[in-house]
Image: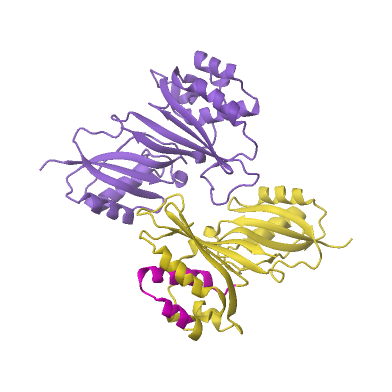
Chain colours: A purple, B yellow
């Protein structure tokens, strides 16, 4: 019998994990999920994640796939996994797909969200789930600056320095940057075909610097032209970042 | 110089605490707050809480007061405390009040909220913050039954058995019970002049049993008439319960 290829969606609260990718010396989402699959199916399995996420970053709809000999039905897989997995990881859906599907290689793009709490006081129910920034944001200035980042650009200035050295190509296409206000919360939603290491967190940090007057639209144009990291803003904390969904 | 009487509002995520009240052998909100005040003012202080809350129960606006010789201004108290306190407790406001004010004795009533997630899958961002009940709730039946509980009744059937033995009087007045649906979440909001131990959690458990057909409106009438705990429903988990506010 041929191996089945299962496409799985999950959400996770990344606060307790050192990111998605398996590491030899730290707790990861990948390892936790692979161990649960091994318990359920009786076979050691490697999953293909759609993306890496950093330490402390969350996912609302993360996609992975894996090949398995197991005949367990998809709804049984969902129920079984949600029983075995810890409460901060949840399997949302599972379907059998064509053998050729690969969660990372077939991704056409991703949507990230960065959540900012602008209330004077921290929100005790959103610990590690939002950046607490207790100041007014100049949304109009941020929206105007965000437009400059949309489109196809060399985003080298919006990439973690150590990561850049290993990359041949730092050109990416940002489809859209939306800024939505909802009470004390401001969500910055970034869609694109692919993202460099820390790219969304540096985009958000740059937009906050724009709001504060620490960077200008000219700085953004210069950052995109020269790749100079100093023209962009700081890297904001990981707890506010969510991988919202993957586009196929 | 006379002692100042400070009235303080705070919110806390109760997941990591054994309730509000100080205990000799367990971590409490009261002890954590009193230790922070001692660090800030240099004096050991006892605070008067508006209420006890159980292990794992949260507060959105909890009131306490305390007497102090400290001359620290109210806004300095807020900032200082929020620096010293852990991230799951936050001071929202502080004001100097009349010497006679007491957070518990002056309370005219309280508002609690119980949060239920009815989505098929657990919400990884609401761990310990809502009851996961992945079924349909019959809101009309629940609203109708809730009306029977409003008003002044003997709520002995809605009280934890061990707590009842120490009480002279189990008559309380419930001002209102509202049931609000918002997407996957159902909030049950209960207002009253005072609450017995576990009373809100048993009211919610009874309303869920009503929805499931495990209890009828006749059972509620009998519970209020006889004080028989078995006529009411189960005690739901503490993580969904929030003390919303105290009325003065």
Q: Is residue A200 above or below residue A34?
A: above
Q: In this view, does A32 lie above or below A226?
A: below
Q: Is residue A189 magenta?
A: no
Q: Is residue B200 magenta?
A: yes
Query: Residue A98 or B143: which is nearer the viewer?
Result: B143
Q: Is residue A73 above or below residue A46?
A: below
In the rendered structure, which segment of residues is drawn in magenta? B195-223
Is A89 on the left or on the right of A81, as rendered?
right
Query: Residue A54 or A97: which is nearer the viewer?
Result: A97
Q: Where is residue B76 in the image (x, y as percent from the top left)?
A: 76, 48
Is A159 on the left or on the right of B23, as rendered?
left
Q: Position of residue A2 (x, y in %)?
A: 12, 40
Q: Is residue A231 visible?
A: yes
**Screen quadrant of the C terminus of chain A:** top left
Considering the whole magenta stretch, tell me its main secondary structure: helix
Q: Residue at x 64, y 24 (%)?
A: A214
Q: Where is residue B55 in the image (x, y as percent from the top left)?
A: 53, 65
Q: Residue at x 30, y 39 (%)?
A: A64
Q: Position of residue A215 (x, y in %)?
A: 61, 22
Quarter residue B206 falls in: bottom left
**Screen quadrant of the N terminus of chain A:** top left
Most distant residue in the left direction? A1
Q: Is residue A234 visible?
A: no
Q: In this view, does A156 lie above or below B139?
A: above
């Amino acid at each position: 019998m041929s191996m089945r290829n299962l496409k799985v969606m999950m959400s996770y609260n990344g606060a307790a994990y050192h990111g998605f990718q398996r590491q030899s010396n730290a707790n990861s989402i990948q390892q936790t999920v692979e161990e649960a699959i091994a318990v359920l199916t009786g076979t050691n399995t490697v999953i293909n994640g759609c993306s890496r996420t950093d330490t402390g970053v969350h996912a609302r709809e993360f996609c992975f796939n894996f090949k398995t000999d197991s005949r367990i039905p998809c709804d049984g897989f969902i129920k079984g996994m949600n029983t075995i997995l810890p409460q901060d990881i949840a399997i949302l859906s599972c379907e059998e797909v064509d053998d050729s599907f690969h969660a990372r290689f077939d991704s056409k793009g991703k949507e990230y969200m960065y959540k900012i709490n602008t209330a004077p006081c921290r929100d005790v129910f959103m610990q590690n789930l939002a950046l607490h920034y207790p100041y007014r944001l100049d949304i109009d200035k941020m929206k105007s600056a965000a437009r400059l980042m949309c489109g196809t650009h060399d985003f080298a200035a919006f990439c973690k320095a150590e990561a850049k050295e290993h990359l041949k190509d730092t050109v990416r296409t940002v489809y859209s940057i939306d800024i939505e206000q909802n009470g004390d919360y401001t969500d910055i939603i970034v869609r694109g075909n692919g993202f460099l290491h820390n790219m969304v967190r540096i985009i958000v940090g740059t937009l906050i610097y724009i709001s504060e007057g620490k960077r200008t639209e000219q700085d953004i144009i210069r950052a995109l032209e020269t790749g100079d990291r100093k023209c962009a803003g700081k890297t904001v904390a990981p707890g506010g970042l969510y991988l919202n969904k993957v586009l196929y």
